Structure formats: structure tokens, C-alpha cells
Amino acid sequence: MENTTAIIAEDEKELRNHLRSQLLEIWPELQIVGEARNGKEALELIERHGPDIAFLDIQMPGLSGMEVARKVARSCRVVFVTAYDEYAVKAFENEVVDYLLKPVTRERLGKTVSRLKSEITSPDPLALEALQGVERVLAGLTEHKSTNFLRWIRVQHEKSLQLIPVDEIYYFKSSDKYTVVRTETNEHLIRKPIKELIRELDPHLFWQIHRGTVVNVTRIAGVSRSLTGKGAVRLKNISDSLTVSQPYMHLFKQM
């Protein structure tokens, strides 16, 4: 679509750059007329440029994305960018609100872009009633927030930065001065040590099973025990097997 304009509001520079680069790949005709680091800047950009679309991070310094949306919902289409998980997704879907989960994946962004292209010619600005519905649900999600835990890992891919959602990672494993990040299709190396990762990962999702290994429990297919007391973890969809040290075998008593 020609002459469609947008602004991006996100307080983290790397995530802002990531969203912009993916948007320009998927929708090269889109004109990004401004980028904001907080809600106040976002509101100023919208008032100055009158964009067709505003990609708003929900949690920003100053004015939140929700507060900005409340002010501009009838003048442009709003797409929320959020680090909330599946609890909040239900709220967005129930209120028919456009949203993207951080880190933004190409597949999800492609679906959003397709919908925006088909609807932007006859815009249906976000109703204040829908905003209020989302706000009510989000207000009750404090206990479910996982913002204290890592939600993505930054890796170098060729000459660009790639963001991998942590729930797509099978395991982390120490390797010399690096840590291996294993997904279903690739291996990456990062410099963050296992000890530091353990402090930052959700302990309900990632278990340390060896001095140098942390595994995503949702990717475990099964575990077997040897006569020496050690274990071997089998993983879903990949052939890798991980050793479980004897002190960590108690984690698998219920399996």
C-alpha cells in the first residue's frame, strides 16, 4: 500500500531497531516517519505527523502505551507491542486489539501487516471501550508478569543482531569461553556465562542439570538413569542428549 505512514514507540533501542528492520523487510512501502523512546515523544510524533499506524510499547517511561492509545485511538490505528505473555494475549484477542509480542517474530509481524494492509483503507480506530477492557485485564496480571526474567536472547547472526525468544531455546551449555544457545534448527554462541544466565532465567522454565548445562523443561522428551546415578535427557525433535549430574536427578522424580 502506498503512502501508509507509521511511528514506532519503544524505550529499548535494540528492540526499536529490530522492529523497524523487520517492518521494512516485510512492508517496504511503509513510511516510518518517526521513532520515540517514551510515551511523551510518541504523542508528539503522532500530533506532528498524523501517522496511519502507531506501534506502541505498552510499558514506557512517562506516558505508557495505553495512555498514548487512549489519546489517539480515534485518529490512527494502534498496534500494541508487549512483553506480556499468554495471559494478556487473551485480553487483546477478546477485545479485537492488534498486538505484537516481544521479541517480535517475522511470522507474527507478517500476519499483522497483512491485516493492516487490508483494513487501513477503511480504518476502524480502536474503540475506547476495547481499551478499557484490555486495561482491566492487564491490571490484574501483576502476579503473572515475568519482566524480571529474560524473555529473549541477543545473538549475532552474520552481520546483524538476532533476538531469540527464550521459550524457543532448548538448552544453554558452556563451551570454552562461550555459551552454546541451542534452538531446534540452529546453534549460536554468546559470551554470557551459565552462572549469570541461571540468575536471569525463569526457574520454572529452565532447570540447571549439570554444572555447565541449563535445559528448557518444555523441550524435554524424557530422561533415563544410569547405574552410576547420572541421567540422560532426551529432547523433542532434535537428537541431542544432555547429561544430568547426580545432584540434579531429584528434579525428575515426577517424570
Image: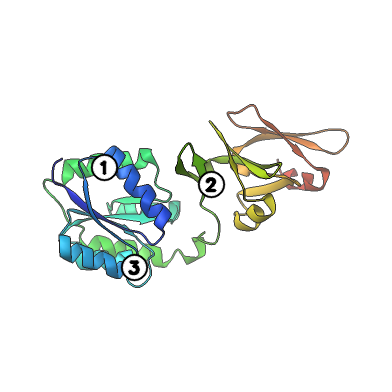
- Find residue 90 and report its horizontal and vertical position in percent: 38, 52
The crowding category of the residue bearing disc 1, from other C-alpha atoms within 10 Å (few below 14, some 14 to 19, many at least 20), is some
Return the disc, 2 or 3, that comes first in the chain's sequence.
3
Q: Nearer the viewer, residue 53 or 247?
A: 53
Looking at the rendered image, the quarter that the C terminus falls into is top right
Q: Is residue 108 above or below residue 126?
A: above
Horizontally, residue 116 falls left or right of residue 145, namely: left
**Mark 2 to mark 3: distance in Å?**
25 Å
Horizontally, residue 140 falls left or right of residue 42, namely: right
What number is the disc on residue 64? 3
- Find residue 127 and report its horizontal and vertical position in percent: 20, 60
Q: At 36% from the left edge and 41% from the top edge, which residue is drawn?
A: 108
Location of residue 37 (image quadrant): bottom left
Return the disc, 1 or 2, that comes first in the chain's sequence.
1
Horizontally, residue 163 falls left or right of residue 4, namely: right
Q: CB under 8 Å between callouts 1 and 2?
A: no
Q: Amino acid at mark 2?
A: Val
Label 2's element?
helix
Horizontally, residue 235 falls left or right of residue 142, namely: right
What number is the disc on residue 113? 1
Q: At 16% from the left edge and 64% from the top edge, which residue is drawn?
A: 48
Is residue 70 among the parts visible in the rendering?
A: no
What number is the disc on residue 166? 2
Q: Nearer the viewer, residue 170 or 38?
A: 38
Q: Nearer the viewer, residue 52 or 121?
A: 52
Q: Amino acid at mark 3?
A: Ser
The crowding category of the residue bearing disc 3, from other C-alpha atoms within 10 Å (few below 14, some 14 to 19, many at least 20), is some
Q: At 35% from the left edge and 73% from the top edge, which residue is drawn?
A: 62
Q: Nearer the viewer, residue 46 or 246?
A: 46
Q: At 46% from the left edge and 43% from the top edge, which residue is drawn?
A: 162
Q: CB under 8 Å between callouts 1 and 3?
A: no
